[in-house]
Amino acid sequence: MKRLLLLLCLCSIGAYGAMSQSNHFKKTKKYLDKRKFDKAIMISQKRIAQADTLELSEAWFWLGEANRRTYFHKVKEVRLKDDAGYYALDSLLDNAINAYQQSWLMQGKCYSIIAAERLNELEHFIHIIANRYLDLKKEKRFAKSIERALRCNEFACEQQFGMLDTALVFAGVHAAEINGDTANVAKIYEQLIELGASDILVYERASDFYLNLGDTLKAVETLDYATLLFPESFAVYKLNLETLLRIGFWEQAFAEIDLGTKRYDRKIYEMNYLKAKCYHQAYQQDALSDVQKEQYFVIAEENYILSNKIMPENYDCIIGLADLYYRHLRFLAGKKQNKDTSRLTLMTKKSNAAQKLAVFLKAKEDKDVLSTIHEMELREKILRQQ
């Protein structure tokens, strides 16, 4: 009988505790509805200290609500250009983010799910505000806001209830650059790559970042990893090849060209152009022998011409060919033992023809260039008449 009474007492105490806890949450909501925000925050903070494990998710959620709604009420009275006013409200926003994150981690009833939704909403709102700061050239405020938005997004990705916002992450990189925080830029890119970001631009910008730091090995590793993730992507292949050319890894670049020719046989124009570009850039090395220069020139010229047959109005292809002819003309003219004037004459004609065609192709897009061409032709006619 005593055991039964003890059990009934424990049950009644538990029921009273749960009812009391629920009443406190109702009080928080009541104060918020009446815009008594300070009291709502105070009660929510007290309940976290007193709540049992089962109710902690709800307690943290209501603290997040109290801070968030207080922030949105007060922010209406602050102008965007009023830095002091926004600084005063920053703690409310940070407290709201922290409380919602705690609510999610407690995994209580449905409150953790709602808390996750609130974090996503805050992320989008903060990102919008950050972009306005950028428009106003308030870079420090922009950087601070982006850091706050990233906290929401990174937490969402870690807990797998949100999607990676690449645009926000790039804004985070810009914010870190504003602060001169190179280590944080590297950290952001590393996190993105670990998450297996599906946006190829991530790997392009990461490799550029490492190249600018002088870390060519890390740049190549980044693109090698991208190739493993996207083995069929021509964009990744092209990016990898152009990076190898940029850092002068010629043997690896030649190997990539051979691989790409077999793998991307349907992209004949692109592969011809890339091969021409590869050997064109390799041709410009100072350490090459005359024989190697002649070999690279022949391969580059052949592939520029093949590419041009498929896309006859491609400006990049023609300007590349014009540059190749010009460089080879200088190479031939600089050889003291060269007595083949007919080849020099032929190379001069090829160079002039390619340059003229490149100018005409550019003129289709640029009216100023077209008017310059007409002026040059008019001058030539006047000189001939004289």
Image (cartoon, helix red, strand yellow):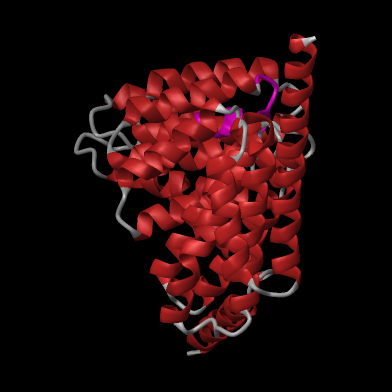
The image position of residue 303, as x and y in percent, is 59, 32
Q: Which residues are magenta?
A: 231-240
Q: Is residue 239 magenta?
A: yes
Residue name at image x 23 percent, y 28 percent: 287
Q: Residue 88 is drawn in which quadrant?
A: bottom left
Name the residue nearer the viewer: 42 or 140.
Answer: 42
Horizontal side of 244 relative to 379 (left or right) equals left
Q: Residue 76 is drawn in which quadrant?
A: bottom right
Q: How many marks?
A: 0
Q: Residue furthest front?
A: 1
The image position of residue 307, as x and y in percent, is 66, 38
Horizontal side of 189 relative to 125 (left or right) equals left
Name the residue nearer the viewer: 22 or 175.
Answer: 22
Looking at the image, residue 361 lies above or below residue 350: below
Name the residue nearer the viewer: 162 or 66.
Answer: 66
Looking at the image, residue 254 lies above or below residue 55: above
**Secondary structure that dominates the magenta span:** helix
